[in-house]
Amino acid sequence: MTDTTYSEILYEQIGAIARISHNRPAARNAESKLLLNELNDAVLRAGADADIRVIILAGVGDHFSAGHDLKEAQTSRSAFTVEERWDYEILHYFEFALRIWDLPKPVISQVQGACVAGGFMVANMCDLMVASEDAFFSDPVCQTLGTAAVEILIHPWVMGLRQAKDMLFTGRRISAKEGFEMGMVNRLVARADLESTTLALAEQVAKAPPFALRLTKRSLNRGYDMQGFRTALQAHFDTHQLSHNSAEFMAARDKGLGGAIAEGKNR
Ligand SMILES: C/C=C/C(=O)SCCNC(=O)CCNC(=O)[C@H](O)C(C)(C)COP(=O)(O)OP(=O)(O)OC[C@H]1O[C@@H](n2cnc3c(N)ncnc32)[C@H](O)[C@@H]1OP(=O)(O)O
């Protein structure tokens, strides 16, 4: 069953699975304000629906997501004050992405093509990841925008510190195969098998009793909290905001944030 409430995401219910897809393929699923608001609404809705046991986050078309919508950012947010940017980013990036991590149900990302910056942040906040062979992952924004990575620095926690430093310092792309070898990707499949493999994994997970699943996710995530996970994310968010006020970021903004799309593409 496909829900038609939303305009920039797709919400489908397939038995006990909710599949929520970025749905702006012409813009490579860049995450606009509306898309993020709809994604958050859909995640909350699936979380509250007793018939849903597992959630898949996906992207319609050839790419998972090209990250924040930089064209919208240029026209709507480039003149933001510190306070306005803080309010926008803590809600749309920090709280919305942590919502996925904290959801009392397993969330699986289904990734093909580009999975970049803000899109990669969203995919990496999921509990499991299935990727097709054409997928690639990158966070080029230190190089292209002059910001301290994205708003939630999830990557070292799921791919390892050295791998995260390599990717963030160089801005380079990580192939799906590399992602699989470093343990970030749970299943690596041919593009033609991406949807069916992700659905089969979700259905397998959905067979577990939901309260047991919920407590298992809670315990695993709490183990990270004991290691300072949440505090580290909060500290990084503040650092990221500081980087928006640097001369390096201002220079990128004044050149036009849209230029970073071409730069990101050349990584
Ligand atoms: C702290 C910051 C966090 C962030 O998330 S900043 C965002 C960082 N993201 C990037 O640097 C990604 C840049 N985009 C790309 O690298 C490429 O794109 C892709 C590899 C994703 C896809 O390449 P291809 O299939 O050749 O498409 P195409 O011709 O580059 O783009 C098609 C249309 O999509 C628009 N688009 C792509 N990425 C974004 C974006 N991030 N924000 C807004 N629009 C985007 C383009 O401009 C263009 O549009 P038109 O058809 O009108 O020319």
Image (cartoon, grey):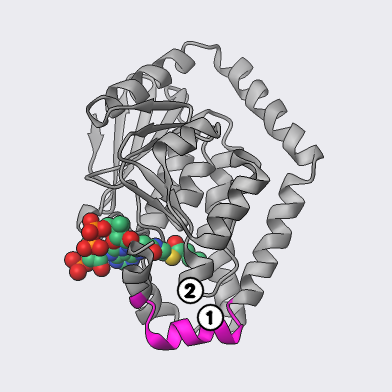
Give whichever of 146, 22 is nearer the camera.
Answer: 146
Q: Is residue 13 above or below residue 92?
A: above
Residue at mark 1 to residue at mark 2: CA–CA distance: 6 Å
- SS under mark 1: helix
Question: Residue 249: which disc?
Answer: 1
Tag 1–tag 2 contact (CB < 8 Å): yes
- Residue 74 in the image: state x and y as whole percent: 38, 79
- Residue 174 in the image: state x and y as whole percent: 45, 46
Does the magenta stretch mainly form a helix, a strand or a loop? helix
Kindly identify the amino acid type of the residue bearing the numbered disc 2.
Leu
Identity of the residue drawn at 44% across and 79% down: 77
- Residue 73 in the image: state x and y as whole percent: 40, 74
For the C terminus, give its image quadrant. Answer: bottom left
Which contiguous range is marked in magenta? 244-259
Classify mark 2: residues with Cα within 10 Å, few (<14), some (14-19) or many (20+): many
Identity of the residue drawn at 38% across and 46% down: 136
Q: Does residue 238 show up magenta in the picture? A: no
Kindly identify the amino acid type of the residue bearing the numbered disc 1.
Phe
